[in-house]
Image (cartoon, grey):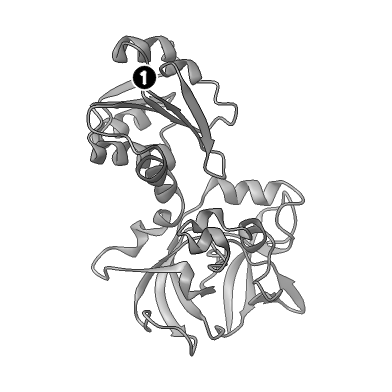
Amino acid sequence: MQVKAAVTLGYQQPFVIKDVEVAPPGKDEILVKIVATGVCHTDAVMRDNPGVVPMPAILGHEGAGIVASVGEAVSGIRVGDHVVLSYAACHHCENCLSNHPSACEDFNTLNFGGRREDGTTPYRLGDQDLSLFFGQSSFSQYVVTRASNAVVVDPEVDLTLLGPLGCGIQTGSGTVLNRLKPVVGESLVVFGCGAVGLSAIMAAKLTGCSQIIAVDIHASRLALAGELGATHQINGKEQDAVAVIKQITGKGAHYAVGNDRRLRYRSAGRTRGETAGNGGDCGLYRRYHP
């Protein structure tokens, strides 16, 4: 079928609306009509940095839409279902089988390599293949993705709000709920209150953290962080964030979430700790009680 898509023809080039061909879904795939998609910083990084995703490509990885058709081997998803799409995983390596698909041994190949596992792509522009991105390429009106890439959601919920669940929201909340796992009464600081950071704040509130500290340089983001659960807000341009955090917590925060790969905010935590990463730009820092 022919649809319109925002195509990236080369590195550091603008998105261009083109008529592209979308192949029918394979036996374990679904065809999804995209209702809305988030635009993530990762999309810009892939577009602007040579050598990561083969070009030309259809980027986008926060898609939400309605299932238009399903492959013959698909079960649990039907035509008309509302779905949110997320990253690709092989679902047969050791990490996938132990319920850690974000650590799939083929994660980079499947999400950034531009092809399905069998080496094909469902998208073409004329006689040229277009790279598949994150197993979906949601900057297209219709996408083909594996059924295991999709999560069925309540049809009463507005799909235009759900796209970021597939990336930014699950990254921030998953960092807190699945990796750091704070308990009631502990403290957590979030550096950067974009989609990922705000999701971490909401998750921290759910866990019962007594002190949830938001650090950013934009007053509007800090105000929203307060609405979503942050007990304290610090403007990093106007205040010494580390000093204020220690003043609030006494010894430093039990946990910190940030987007700095060097984790330069270690001094905001307590003594004795460990570092971890989530596979992207979001760094984690965990401090234990001395």
**Residue 61 in view, yes or no:** no
Q: At x 34% / y 39%, what residue is drawn?
A: 181
Q: At x 62% / y 58%, what residue is drawn?
A: 105
Query: In this rendering, would 203 be left or right of 107?
Result: left
Where residue 135 appears, as percent x and y from the top left, is 57, 66
Q: At x 61% / y 83%, what residue is drawn?
A: 23
Classify the position of the N terminus by image quarter: bottom right
Residue ranking furthest to the bottom:
72
- For disc 1, the marked residue is 234
Classify the position of the C terminus by image quarter: top left
Quadrant in the rendering for residue 210: top left
Give neighbour class at mark 1: few <14, some 14-19, many 20+ (Cα, 10 Å). Answer: many
Where residue 227 appears, as percent x and y from the top left, is 24, 34
Foreground of the two, 160 or 71? 71
**Residue 67 in view, yes or no:** yes
Vertical placement of 141 versus 250: above or below? below
Vertical placement of 153 versus 274: above or below? below
Q: At x 39% / y 24%, what residue is drawn?
A: 288
Where residue 104 appears, as percent x and y from the top left, is 57, 58
Vertical placement of 35 versus 124: above or below? above
Where residue 86 appears, as percent x and y from the top left, is 47, 61
Q: Amino acid at mark 1?
A: Ile
Query: In this rendering, would 276 be left or right of 239?
Result: right
The secondary structure type at the circle numbered 1 is strand
Vertical placement of 273 versus 229: above or below? above
